[in-house]
Image (spheres, grey):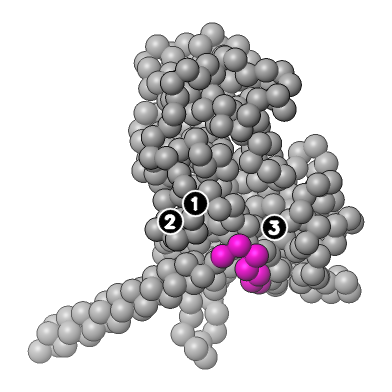
Amino acid sequence: MHVLLLASLTLSSESSLLRQRIAAIEAADARDTGLVASSRLSVPVVCIDPMLPKQRMEIKTEDDTFCCLLRDVGFGGLIGIVGLDTRTRRLRRHGILARIAFVDVLPPPPGSPPLIPTEVRASLIGIRRMCVCGPAEGMRLRVGRFRRGYADGVIDGGIALGFGEERFNNAREGCSVCENVSSASAVDPSGQMPSTEVTEATVEVLIDPDELWEDELVGENNLSFTSEDPLDGCDAGAMSEDSSLISAPTKAQALSILLDLWLELIRKQETLVRSDVALCARLTPDVLISHVLDDIGPKPPTSAPTALSLWGASLINPLPSLGVAPECRGSVLEAVDSAERLAIVTRACERSIRSLRDGSPLI
C-alpha cells in the first residue's frame, strides 16, 4: 500500500512539473512572438561570451550568483548577453536576448527560504539582437560581469559573477539605434547594493526586416526574398579593397560562396590535420559543425544580407569555439548597417579560409 501511494505521489508530482513546463514554453513562445522591433523590456544583463541569434550556449556553473540568476529567471526566461570590447576594455552596447531553453533547478516554492544551488546546468539560445538603453556617451550601468573583485571566498581565487557599475562603449556615429535609445537603465549611484544582488537593465529589441525571411509574416510585409542564391557569374575573389564600390547583392553573393567553401574545407580530414583544428574544440569539427547547423538552420538567401551575415558569423564562430576564424560576433552586432555586417564577416571568413588552406596565422 505504501509503495503504491509513493508511486502515485511521484506520478502526480511529475505530471505537475510537466504541466508547469508546458505552460512556461507556451508563455515564452507567446512573449518571443511579440518581440518586435523597438520593443523595450527589462532583463538582467550579463557580460559573457558574445552570442548571435539561434546560437546555443551550454552552461555548467558552480558560481553562487550565476546559479541563483539562472534559477530565478527560470526556464523560458530571458537574459541580456553582451560582450567585452577588448580594444576599449568596455562593454559593448549591442548584444543578444537569450532564452533559457533548459535549466536543471527550479525556483523555490513561495514562502520557502531560497537555498543556493551547488551547481546548475543550463542552455541558452539567442533569440533577438538588442541594444542596452542609456546615454550616448559615458554610459555606466549596473550589470553582471565576472571579475576577480567579486571572488571573495572562492577557493583558489579566480573570478566570480557580480553586479556592479560598468562602463559601456560610446554610441557609434551614424548608428540610428544608439541615437534613439537614450532612456535610463538600472543603476546604483550609491554603490551600496551588494554585488550578489541581481538587477535589471532596459534593452531595446533590434530586428532588420530581412531577419524575418523564414517567417510567414514576411509575405504580409510585402518583402520579397528568393529561395535560392543567384550565384551565377559571381566571383568571391573579386571583392575590391574599396568595398563601397561593390553593390550589396554582389557582396552577399560573394559571402555566400565563401561560406560554402569554408564548410567544404572544415569537413576535410586533410584540413584538420594541417591546421590542428581538432585541438581547439571539445567535439570533433565535423560533429560540432553538424550541431551548429542544426541550431542555426538553413543558410539565408543573398537577398537577406543581415540574416546571411549573422548566420555566417554564427557558423565560423561557433559555440564552443573551433578557434579557426577571427572573432567577429561582437563587431557584427555593433555594425551600423547590413553592408558593414557583410564586410566584417567576409573579412573574417577570408582570413579563416587562408588559414585552413595553408596553416597561416589568423592575425
Q: Nearer the viewer, residue 97 or 277?
A: 97
In the rendering, at what x and y percent does residue 116 appear? 55, 71
Q: Circle 1 sits in a helix, a strand or a loop, which is it?
A: loop
Residue 251 in sight here: yes
Give the residues in magenta. 36-44
Amino acid on which the number 3 mark rests in the picture: Cys
Q: Quadrant of the N terminus?
A: bottom left
Q: Is residue 328 left or right of residue 223?
A: right
Mark 2 → mark 3, Cα distance in angstroms: 27 Å
The residue furthest front is 222
Q: Split into 4 quadrants, where in the image is the C terminus?
A: top right
Q: Amino acid at mark 2?
A: Gly
Residue at mark 2: 219
In the rendered image of this protein, does residue 306 appear above or below residue 76?
above
Of discs 2 and 3, which sits in the foreground?
Answer: 2
Question: Of tags 1 and 3, which is closer to the observer?
Answer: 1
Residue at image mark 1: 223
